[in-house]
Image (cartoon, rainbow, N blue to C red):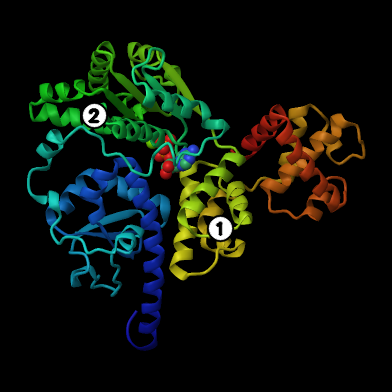
Amino acid sequence: MTGGLEGYDAVAEANAQKSVLAIHWSRICERLKAEVGEVEYRTWLRQITVGPVDEDEITLYLPTRFLRDWVRGQYGDRLGTLWNAEVPAIRRVELQVARPGSASATSPADGVTVPAATTEAREEAVPRPAVPAPVAEEPRHAEVRSDLAAPLDPRFTFDTFVVGKPNEFAYACARRVAERPSSPGFNPLFLYGGVGLGKTHLMHAIGAELLREGRVSVAYMSAEKFMYRFIAAIRSQSTMEFKEQLRSVDVLMIDDLQFLIGKDNTQEEFFHTFNALVDAGRQIVVSADKSPSDLSGLEDRLRTRLGCGMVADIHATTFELRISILEAKASASGVVVPAKVLEFLAHKITSNVRELEGALNRLIAHANLFGRPVTLEATQDVLHDILKAHDRRVTIEEIQRKVAEHWNIRLTDMSSARRARAVARPRQVAMYLAKQLTSRSLPEIGRKFGNRDHTTVMHAVTRVTELMEQDPAFAEDVELLRRMLES
Ligand code: ADP
Ligand code: MG
């Protein structure tokens, strides 16, 4: 990368790398924020500036040595994992000291300068203080003493939560708890479901609602944070203070309880806190990735108590819910995203809401950045990597086999001429799924179903869509098949 024309190319390439990294970084920041909470994020992580990538290592800058060491100790591994998940080629994260925007933020090696080009930075467009506020002293004390009042993400409210079949029960329970905390039957409230389906969102919404009313004190923290605080309290011999603080709140919310599996002492402490609070008529809200009975590794007595109140499951999203969520988020962003694009995303990204949101955010960021309208083509381009990762590679044969098994018909009937409904309906479902889950064209699909015409496939797609709207049991069957094929 030296001299003349090559140098010019290097600059162009560096700029391209810069914008790509900025997009990845803004996604990582979103995740970090969701994981650690707004306050923690603002205090420590927002100071990070993205530097260059060298082979499998990315350099991140922090403005002071203190911050660098703190971030390395607390988040070093996590940053590595997140970067690797975003960009598999990146395997290591190097944290260095350099003030954002200063000359030292330029890597001397290859001349790539990457200012804090995160969405955050763009949104705010205010220079950050040269010396971040919390740098003052001993972090550990600040941590232990810090107020238990929760760092709630202001975006996570009931208003911004899109309700659909998979989450309506959990939503109703959360609302109920926010309206009348500590009602019998709802204490504890145990929310569970897979990653990125809205557990944290609902907990924050409960917190926001209660705080808005201003009637109660709320403490929200992840189980990890709970453990961290507990251990820090032991170290600084302030466990009494810690206990008192916790036991003085009206509503305690602990997120991702599965983290406590195998952490016996912390579990024990949580159990006692839990009992003390419930006995005193306070509300507990807990989330986990599994139901209490499936959380093996948690102490039995804790599991039993956790299951004593209301247990609400958040199911995997349906296509309809994904569409509603995308519509809500797109309209909030102010960027016009055509229905076609939303449908495309809802079909392609089925894993969870976080991924879906991430994809949409990137599209929106792109549209804002380049001032170009969002089209299907641009979407495929901008989300190339995400879509590739979600490419299901399901074959039509697989679909036919699974569907035939499901309705107990012969595989050969998928291509036979028989028109009996018992055969024709499953065949239509298989065509519908082939259209949804593969990139085959209608004529191609038709050929695989006994050389049928593409209009027959089109008819099948319309018919199945209609039936799914009319008949929830049928819709569930089809969704189930889809999920099986996707996994
Ligand atoms: P979990 O805690 O279950 O892993 P989160 O609550 O962090 O998931 O949700 C991941 C992201 O998806 C968040 O940005 C959240 O706002 C969003 N999200 C999840 N479910 C919904 C929903 N029903 N409506 C709107 N946004 C949602
Ligand atoms: Mg969560």
Q: Is residue 402 visible?
A: no
User: Is residue 95 at all visible to an observer of this figure?
Assistant: yes
Q: Is residue 331 left or right of residue 411?
A: left
Residue ID at (39%, 38%): 157
Q: Nearer the viewer, mark 1 or mark 2?
A: 1
Q: Which quadrant would residue 20 be assigned to in this image?
A: bottom left
Q: Residues within 10 Å of mark 2 (few under 14, many from 20)?
A: many
The one nearer the camera, 56 or 160, is 160
Q: Residue 449, which numbered label?
A: none
Report which residue position mark 1 lands on.
337
322 or 178, nearer to the observer:
178
Q: Position of residue 6 (x, y in %)?
A: 38, 84
- Which residue sits furthest bottom? 4
Regarding mark 1 in the picture, which secondary structure is present there? loop
Q: Secondary structure at mark 2?
A: helix
Cα separation, mark 1 vs mark 2, equals 43 Å
User: Looking at numbered disc 2 in the image, what kind of residue is underneath it?
Assistant: Met
| Relative image position of residue 199 (x, y in whole percent) | 42, 33
* Circle nearer the N terminus (1, 2): 2
Q: Amino acid at mark 1?
A: Val
Other-residue count near label 1 (Cα within 10 Å), few / some / many at <14 / 14–19 / ≥20 = many
Residue in the picture at 28% in, 24% down: 251
Whole-percent x, y for residue 83 in the image: 36, 53
Q: Position of residue 321 (x, y in %)?
A: 57, 39
Disc on res. 227: 2
Which quarter of the frame holds ligand 2? top left
Q: Is residue 346 left or right of residue 51?
A: right
